[in-house]
Image: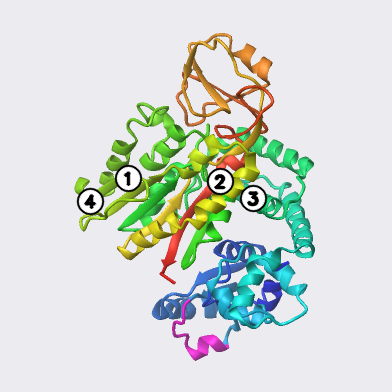
Amino acid sequence: MFFDYLNQFSGIGSYDRIIIFDFQEIIEDNYLSIVAEEFGYRLIYYKDVEEFRYLYETEIKKTQERYLVVLKSNIYLPYDIRCNFYCVDINYKVLFPKLNPNALSLSSIFDMNLLYIAHGNLYKMISSEMETRQFLMEDMFNNENIKDFKGYLISEIEDLLNENDYSTWCRIALLYSKLKYIKYKCNLEDDEELELSIQNKFKDFIFIKYSTLSGYSAYNGPVLLNKGLDYIFMNSKKPALIVMDGMSILDWLIISDDLKGVSYKCNLTYAIIPTITSISRQSLLSGKLPVEMIKPFSLVYEKNMFIERCMESGYKKEEIKYNRGYDFEIDYSDKCICVIINDIDDLVHSQKQGNIGMYSDIKILSKSEKLQNLIKKLYENGFDVYIASDHGHKETKTIGSPKGTGVEVETKSKRTIILKDFADYEGIINEFDLLEYPPYFLPKDYKYLLCEYDKSFGVRDNIILSHGGISIEEVIVPFIKIEGAVNE
């Protein structure tokens, strides 16, 4: 699809030394990392003339290695270096000549592969910005294009299911969320067999490899959510973190449609399991795993733990602000801000129409521009803005509720129960076909019983949204860095 086209257009695989000019930042870093590894290139981002000159003279000229050099801004590139590389300019005008390049550069494009398919199926020129925006919002999603795009998504997911590492599962989670997006936007049928395959293989991954995720560095982005602040403090001196409680990847795809004038980079990270707010959000805001907390099942110490973590990184107490909701004043002394937004989690727990109702409600939320205005307010006040989620959510069928379970930790989740001092937990497991989750990163003196991916507790045979389990939608969540925000 698009990336095969991009490889061919850029000479990747055909030339040993390539310089790509990507001033419109069309190419994702993740794609560059994948093709660099696949084709044996050393990937370099060209940011400083003297630094690259030194590398060129001391290493590049003397080796036969492959180099892929990327320029994202119009920095001076010496003529002699230019002559020793295959140089290619990547821009919307040359990639999609039938559409208005200015509209493409200013628009949020849902998926480059879908755009590539739709552009290939377009048999006329669309020269105006207004028509191109209309094409991106509506015409790109016509039946012919979506049929081809759905086939592409399913094929990619099925190929990736043969692999089993944490980064592959992030790619699957994004592709699967895009499949869900077009399902609700275009009224498509579910692929239940694919869903079963994804969820079962992801469950196996969680039980076998999830416990290893705490060992990964946060240098390129947090792999496990408790490393989120490490990554932020490594990259920003004046950060603002917006925590969208309960936001799934699908929710972010819907919201990002309406983020006008906002550019961003979206990473994916693993929530802390069980995917409950008190456990996962507190891990994000404290940098601690639940086993290291005094009260991991209560939010009573959340604010204090966030302030303590910021102070450990060198901020004074009076420079740190912890807020709930969109409306608050930014003081001159503020240097580190956390904002908790509960809108999505509230919609999850009050939802009567399942995923299709959630899709509609998130569209309404995104069009309210409340998040967009908050981002711009923080950005205009000099903050580096990050958006994170503590967990996603899952549509499930209710299977009834355990009775007389002894000492149970109260949670808002309908997908997990946490027991202490209860002997006959095996009876509950057998009655409700539950999973006994190992206490990875959790206090060891509790039992953690989770529903299967498509089940939840509650009055039998209802369809609800909830969280707390280990489905891919609940566990893998967005972690976003805002790269620009302007008023259009």
- Picture layout, residue 331 above or below residue 46: above
Q: Which residue is mark 3?
A: 177
Q: Is residue 422 left or right of residue 150?
A: left
Which numbered dot is residue 248? 2
Which numbered dot is residue 319? 4
Magenta span of residues? 73-83
Closer to viewer: mark 4 or mark 2: 2
Q: Which residue is mark 1?
A: 323
Task: Check disc 2: other Cα within 10 Å, few if <14, some if 14-19, many if 20+.
Answer: many
Cα separation between marks 2 and 1: 22 Å
Do the CB atoms of the residues marked 3 and 2 lie less than 8 Å apart?
Answer: yes
Q: Nearer the viewer, residue 9 or 376?
A: 376
The type of residue carrying mark 2 is: Ser
Task: Check disc 1: other Cα within 10 Å, few if <14, some if 14-19, many if 20+.
Answer: some
Cα separation between marks 3 and 4: 38 Å
Q: Secondary structure at mark 4?
A: helix
Mark before the other along the chain sequence, 4 or 2: 2
Closer to viewer: mark 1 or mark 3: 1
Color scheme of the displayed model: rainbow
Q: Nearer the viewer, residue 132 or 271?
A: 132
